[in-house]
Image (cartoon, coloured by chain):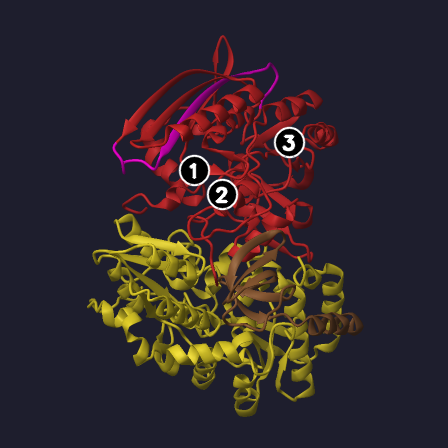
Amino acid sequence: MEDKVLLGHGSGGRLSHELVRKVFVPSLNNPLLSKLDDSAVFEIGGRIAFTTDSYVVSPIFFPGGDIGKLSVCGTVNDLAMCGATPLYLSLSLILEEGFPLEHLRRIVASVKQAAEEAEVQIVTGDTKVVDRGSADGIFITTSGVGAIPQGIDISGSNARPGDRVILSGPIGDHGVAVLSRQEGLEFSVPVESDCAPMNRLVAGMLRASPAIHALRDPTRGGLATTLNEIAAQSGVSIGIEEKRIPIHDGVRAACELLGLDPLYVANEGKLVAMVSPEAAEAVLAAMRRNCYGAEAAIIGEVGAPPSRGRVVMRTALGTSRIVDMLSGELLPRIC
Amino acid sequence: MKYIDEYRDPQLAERLVQKLRERSTRPARLMEFCGGHTVSVFRHGIRQLLPPTVEMLSGPGCPVCVTAIADLDKAILLTELPDIIVATFGDMLKVPGSRSSLRNARADGGDVRVVYSVHDALEIASGSTGKSVVFLGIGFETTAPTIAASLLEARQRGIKNFYVLSLHKLCPPVMKSILDLGEVNLNGIICPGHVSAIIGSTPYQFIPRDYGIACVVSGFEPLDILQSVYMLVEQVESGHPTVEIAYSRGVRPAGNVRALELLHTVFEVCDANWRGIGVVPASGLRLREEFSNFDAEKAFPVSHPPPREPKGCLCGEILRGVKTPLDCKFFSKKCTPDSPVGPCMVSHEGTCSAYYQYRGEDGG
Amino acid sequence: MCLAIPARVTSINGMEAEAEVGGVTRRISIMLTPEVKVGDYVLLHTAYSISVVDEQEAKETLDILRQLV
């Protein structure tokens, strides 16, 4: 392992996994943490899901959202991915000296709006201000708790051979929207971040059928990394079909320009579900009734444990290739 | 997307493959010179579609991979100088030098900026008084004219804190050098599409003439590559090797005359050191005397200890097409995209990276 | 090497232009292809146009492919 922290350690890909596995888990290990799901699930009276996440997105305002909306949606989604009904969130801010108050007001307003939509309450919070240069404007940490209804057992380790892989909509919107505003790139893109709370989408899916085995939102590292995580946790292989994966034209074009593969580009309002084959159509129909799942599609199937490679994609030309996790940070390339 | 989607038509591709299978009777060893082609071949799984008579090898056409380790060390040392911003294409960030990489240099506090275009680096320079911006000029004939254009613009706008470390390389001389080594026995070469958009197809004439090897300039979509393979097979079958352009929508025989003019205004041809291959005569570009005030080599001379090549790494042989990544004991074990040993694993279009990221289910 | 993709030129101002692909737009330099006109497609490499796409040739290539198979 490297002897210092690199940007790639925060990319959500293999380096991030290595950091968790080699630094955090050995010291802090316990049965709840070691599941490495999006939330920890435990019982206090009933079953509770608990999660936390930090948000350092740059730029802080991007097409389709801002760091405030993101910090609510991200944590709500982590709860929802465990089948929990999100209830309460904390909101903790680190502000850089000199940060414009007007920006802070805008961010708090979008926190409020996102919390209202997700029907969660911000019940506790904290603010620290650090010297100019010690932070980049604003960093936010939110933690959240949610209640898990009876009979729900969703985990990244529960995918089973035969399960259908359902994706809730077109991939890569968030990553491309943010990337387009980064210094040195300055593209104008026709897509906005898909940043959205998906708890109601998940609630609708669970009403359609409890036979949902795994749920995860493909954020940093993209769909490819998320599928690899589920495959590894569940000890299965996953087969997907390139032509069934919905992608907006603008995302495809931006990826062609920057030399990126949309499978690795971040989403903030998409989920991927592993659903038993009998329930797949009903769950898909329920997803399509929700505005955040209108373009949901079955993109593949869970298979038996692999000999080589856990996620395999059938290309549009009918050939096959292994889809690996993201390596390092996602960098635009020219060659 | 116009001019992309039409060339990915699966039905047309299937029929083209069928036609190729019918036509190909003799063994055809083909090299895709360009890393961009390597990526496309793997991303679309094209090798799986070819008849057993057609074998495809990957060549050295990845400017990141062929950057000499000594040059990389120099770039990394520049990040340690005061008031210097090193601007680079994202591809270079992770390439391991002898002792560090630009990514590690950035973590150590060096000001390293990833840009999409040399023009963005020029803008950084014009907005950063008191700091010097050094752009790492990597790339083949495709990229060199853009660097030339940026230097002409810098001169015209009077931007004085902008420098280029010219590590540009030229394709036809290294093709000749690889063929002269005689290590690979080739029947055909898929010539680089975007290099050829600049230099045209005439610089490859010596290949069929002197070596009896077929040449086709290809685009990058699956149909482009399949069509080029078909044309190469056709040449091999008929026994009349020549230079053809399959990518005629983007490449003219004479290339881009205007771009070549700018390139030669700013640069002159020099010998260049290729990683894994060594010094190849007249295969590089350095800034002309008139542009020496933009030359990072002259403005910031750095002395560095002799470079260290990673022991046991097969990148050199792989770049020359003599070995494949599967022959290397480090491949996918000690050497992965996250902790690359050699450059071919780093660059997205490096042969090892393409094998690693896009390997088929059977590993091929 | 050398990623370049076809983009449509939507406006030109001296040696600068605006190019579009799939709804994505970016400011580009046309210093290497000063002959380009609005509406043309160019091969775009690192925000420089390196070649004007020949529409006739593009059509003929596809025609050849369709006849071939």
Is residue B22 or residue B107 the one in the foreground?
A: B107
Determine whether A186 is above or below B305 in the image: above
Determine whether C8 is above or below C34 in the image: above
User: Judging from the image, what secondary structure is the residue with disc 3 in?
Assistant: loop
User: Judging from the image, what secondary structure is the residue with disc 2 in?
Assistant: helix
Is residue A178 or residue A47 the one in the foreground?
A: A178
Q: Quadrant of the N terminus of chain B?
A: bottom right
The residue singled out by tag 2 in the image is A178
Is residue B254 or residue A321 the one in the foreground?
A: B254
Pointer 1 and pointer 3: residues touching (CB < 8 Å)?
A: no
**Figure chain in yellow:** B
Q: How many angstroms separate mark 2 from mark 1 (CA)? A: 8 Å
The residue singled out by tag 1 in the image is A57
Query: Which residues are the magenta region?
Result: A131-153
Nearer-N-terminus badge (2/1): 1
Nearer-N-terminus badge (1/3): 1
Q: Is B260 in the magenta?
A: no
Q: In this image, B192 relative to A53: left or right?
A: right
Pointer 2 and pointer 1: residues touching (CB < 8 Å)?
A: yes
Q: Amino acid at mark 3?
A: Tyr
Residue A292 shows which numbered tag? 3
Q: Residue A223's quadrant in the figure? A: top right
Q: Residue at x 71, y 23 (%)?
A: A208
